[in-house]
Amino acid sequence: QVQLVESGGGLVQAGGSLRLSCAASRSIFSINTMEWYRQAPGKQREFVASIWSSGSTNYADSVKGRFTISSDNAKNTVHLQMNSLKPEDTAVYYCKAPMFRSWGQGTQVTVSS
């Protein structure tokens, strides 16, 4: 089992940046894959980015070139650096460990136009 705690959300103007963090209760290297999802009001939760223990990454088309996922194995933390934010990026962002079917509680990101 693993517990996940997200942080770093907030209010930012369009074009700005935020860095989200997801702290895991166990070694993220042992988790194999970590993912970020987001859910906007009235919409389904959608995939944003993933990172494998090998370092390989994958991104949704809507965030490619703007978001970067990374891991800090020493701190058992996964980050999501979000640049050039747009109002349509407004959502609650969730961290997920598919191996354990675990989700964090989410962190709100609001981008004003």
Image (cartoon, rainbow, N blue to C red):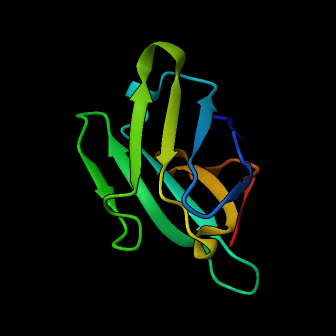
- Residue located at (42% from left, 20% from top): 73
Q: Residue 12's spot in the image, x, y percent?
A: 70, 54
| Residue in the image at 23% along x and 34% along y | 54
Within the image, what quadrant is residue 6 found in? top right
Q: Position of residue 92 (x, y in %)?
A: 71, 62
Residue at (52%, 22%) from the top-left corner? Answer: 76
Kindly give the residue lying farthest to the top in the view shown: 74
State the quadrant of the N terminus.
Answer: top right
Q: Residue at x 31, y 58 (%)?
A: 65
Residue 85 visible to an observer of this rendering: yes
Name the quadrant of the C terminus: bottom right
On screen, residue 92 versus residue 46, left or right, reads right
Q: How many marks?
A: 0
24, above or below 83, in the image:
above
Judge whether residue 1 can be spotted in this image: no
Expressed as whole percent of the image width and height from the top left, the position of residue 31 reads 43, 35
Quarter of the image holding residue 18?
A: top right
Position of residue 77 measured from the top left corner of the image (x, y, whole percent): 53, 27
Q: Is residue 63 above or below residue 20?
A: below
| Residue 58 figure quarter | bottom left
Q: Is residue 12 above or below residue 75?
A: below
**In this view, 7 is above or below 93:** above
Left or right: 62 as drawn, with respect to 10: left
